[in-house]
Amino acid sequence: MAICPSGHESQSEDYCDYCGLAMRPAGVPFGAAVPPPPPAPPHAPPMPGGFPGATEGLLTCPICRTPKAGRYCEECGYDFDLSTSPGMAVPNYGYPPHGPGQQQAPFQPPSYQTPGQQQLQGQQQVQGYGYPPPGPAYPPQPEPAYPLGDPYGAVPGYPPAEQSVPAPSVEQYGTSFHLAPPSQQVPQAEPVRSNWVAVISADRDYFTDMMARSGPEASGLFFPPYCPERRVPITGRGQLRIGRRSQHRGTVPEIDLSVPPEDPGASHQHALLAEQQDGSWVLVDQDSTNGTTMNGGSEPIAPHTAIALNDGDRIHIGAWTTITLHRA
């Protein structure tokens, strides 16, 4: 086993395994200085172009001239096996063929073209395949000759007369559906809606007639001494219920007759006012207990039947309530 200058035993013969010092050469006594190693010869300066002949005889990439180290080129990813398979031609990508013993051409980067150059090159490539030869995009047009320099002078045949285009016919498009021109279409005016107002009041004449027609069960009714008139706008509200509010059902009609003085002859769901599409109104009795009369008549209207209303019609409900409709 070798011994280093520090006296350590080492299995390695160049450097000590324990301290890392260089081992003593053979014949050098223990403790003597180890002579330094001879200087290395100077390196030759690099030659231009690398090392000529280093890749001679090796298969190189036809694109970047990199020596083949596997199936794919390490620089550009060229597939050597795909291009050299039986029946497959090896593309040279614009480079001259080369092989063992031939001088390799210097690598040149591919040239880039602008979109305009690419379009011009594409036009040149498709020549001979039924396409016309490329020419200017807009050929020059001859200037019209004006007499005596007057652009508005009368020239026979110039400018050409405008040709009238015939209107499309029904037979041309195979349909009988025809729309009138926009100028001939008359817009339909929306119906003018009037403003309707319902006036609720206590009617003494109606109360007297009702008491005369009623039996002894109506003997306890008295006309209210004070009942202010109420005006309720009804236009645009759709439907308005007429009657008295019900605490048990939780319903409050739009025309509430339970407001003091409460009319005891009106039902909770007595009648209904309904607005029509043309802005008019109809009256429908909801099968009330005492019925509904109109304009001082004694015969009640049929229940669940729409009765058209006019301006000034009077609706009699309960013991003394009269609802008069007014159209503004």
Image (tube, helix red, strand yellow):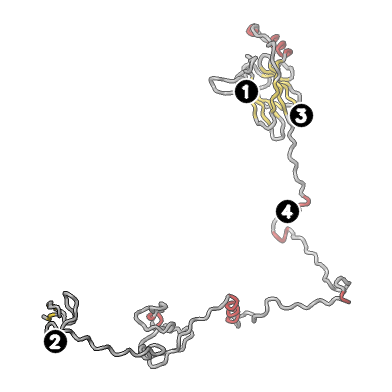
Please state which of residues 45 and 176 is positioned toward the viewer in this rendering. Answer: 45
**Of all residues shown, which one is farthest toward the front?**
32
- In the figure, residue 68 lies in which quadrant? bottom left
- Tell me the element at label 2: loop
Give how far apart the Cα atoms at labels 1 and 3 are.
28 Å
Question: According to the image, label 2 marks what residue?
Answer: 28
Label 4 or label 2, whichever lies nearer to me, is 2
Q: Is residue 251 left or right of residue 3?
A: right
Q: Which mark is residue 162?
A: none
Judge depth for marks 3 and 4 and give the one in front: 3
CA gap, disc 4 and disc 2: 122 Å
How many C-alpha atoms fall within 10 Å of the one at disc 2: few (<14), some, or many (≥20)?
few
Q: Quadrant of the N terminus?
A: bottom left
| Residue in the picture at 71% in, 33% down | 279
Closer to the camera, 91 or 302?
91
Tag 3 or tag 1, which sits nearer the N-term? 1
Tell me, yes or no, whether the two marked residues, 2 and 3, touch with CB atoms within 8 Å.
no
How crowded pointer 3 is (Cα within 10 Å; few <14, some 14-19, many 20+) is rated as few
Q: Is residue 176 above or below residue 123?
A: above
- In the image, which disc is placed on residue 328? 3
Lower sequence index among marks 4 and 2: 2
Q: Is residue 299 visible?
A: no
Q: Position of residue 169 (x, y in %)?
A: 74, 59
Total labels drawn: 4
- The disc, 1 or 4, on the residue closer to the chain's N-terminal end is 4
Question: Callout 2, which amino acid?
Answer: Val
- Give 78 or 266, whichever is nearer the viewer: 78
**Residue 25 vs residue 169: left or right?**
left
**Disc 1 marks which amino acid?**
Gln
The crowd level at tag 4 (other Cα within 10 Å; few <14, some 14-19, many 20+) is few
Residue 178 drawn at (x, y percent): 73, 53
Residue carrying label 1: 286
